[in-house]
Image: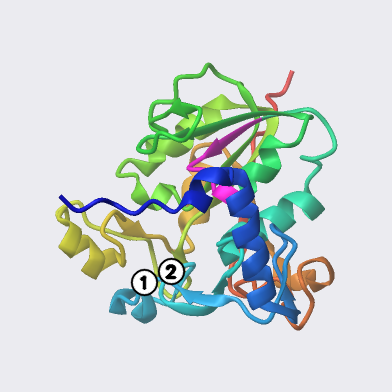
Amino acid sequence: MQKLFINPLKQLIPANVRSALKKTSLRIAHSGTEHKCSLCDSGIKSFLPFGFSFPVLTEKQVVGGGYRQDVLCPVCGSLDRERLLHLYLLHKTDLFDRPYRLLHIAPEPRLTEILKSKPNLDYLTADFYVDTVMVKMDITDIQYPDNSFDAIICNHVLEHIIDDGKAMSELYRTLKPEGWAILQVPISHILESTYEDSSIVTEQEREIAFGQDDHVRIYADDYVDRLRQVGFKVNVFKWVDEPEVFGGENNLFGLNKEEAIYFVSKIAAAA
């Protein structure tokens, strides 16, 4: 029987040290001054291409979807949308400055590392499918009482949920009065209304229709109306209007210039 070769160095070097060494080697290989990753703080020559190449994503001009250049950090693997979210939290909220109970749904790995390290945050990660989170959660039936969270991050999740209205209502219910959430989705600004079809159920059909085998719709600008219908106050923030802290005209952080932040809040009931 053939014996498997086990690298003795791999056994001797702890996993965290191996990870640090790998990241250092990637920093050296991709070192540059043209761009910077806000999450791993690496100066790099360029971000890498990323995304799916299904024709519908190009045809519908889906922001946050499709194959595109300058997306993936070659050192830490963060995506443009994750860097935008981090920069928004850093410069446009007080999340890092005062106590917060924060729910992070389908958490992004690099951002999770940062948020977990903040002593002011009572931080909870949740997902329905993966096991590396703190709790398993169906966001159409959240297991926490009304007014549980000061803030919620839910980045590119709702396009996977068949009953997105129920999910939005649950997010609203569990936010505290005056609480806020960031609810990002892929979106097309050329569609007249959100495109969905309940008869499209197979993975292959969904790839063709929606650009990903587990997506059930392509949102249009009426996404804002859907959020308002459940009670949210909606602010659409375009980072290109404040370029000085989001990377300037040279797009230092490799952000998608078409992507906006959908920042929603729950208004306190009148006394």
Q: Is residue 223 left or right of residue 104?
A: left
Q: At label 2, which amino acid type do we have?
A: Gly
- 67 and 35: which one is in front? 35
Q: At label 1, which amino acid type do we have?
A: Phe
> Image height check: is 83 above or below 11?
below
Residue positioned 17% across, 63% down in the render: 205
Q: Quadrant of residue 199?
A: bottom left
* SS at badge 1: loop
Label 1: which residue?
A: 52
> Image height check: is 16 above or below 32?
above
Label 2 vs label 1: CA separation? 7 Å
Magenta residues?
102-110
> Image height check: is 146 above or below 13?
above
The magenta stretch spans residue 108: yes
- 247 and 36: which one is in front? 36
* SS at badge 2: loop
Residue positioned 15% across, 50% down in the render: 1
- 51 and 138: which one is in front? 51
Residue 177 shows up from this direction: yes
Q: Nearer the viewer, mark 2 or mark 1?
A: 1
Label 2: which residue?
A: 65
Q: Earlier along the polypeptide chain: callout 2 or callout 1?
A: 1
Q: Is residue 17 left or right of residue 245?
A: left
Quadrant position of the C terminus in the picture: top right
Q: Are marks 2 and 1 in contact (CB under 8 Å)?
A: yes
- 10 and 179: which one is in front? 10
Residue positioned 73% across, 80% down in the render: 32
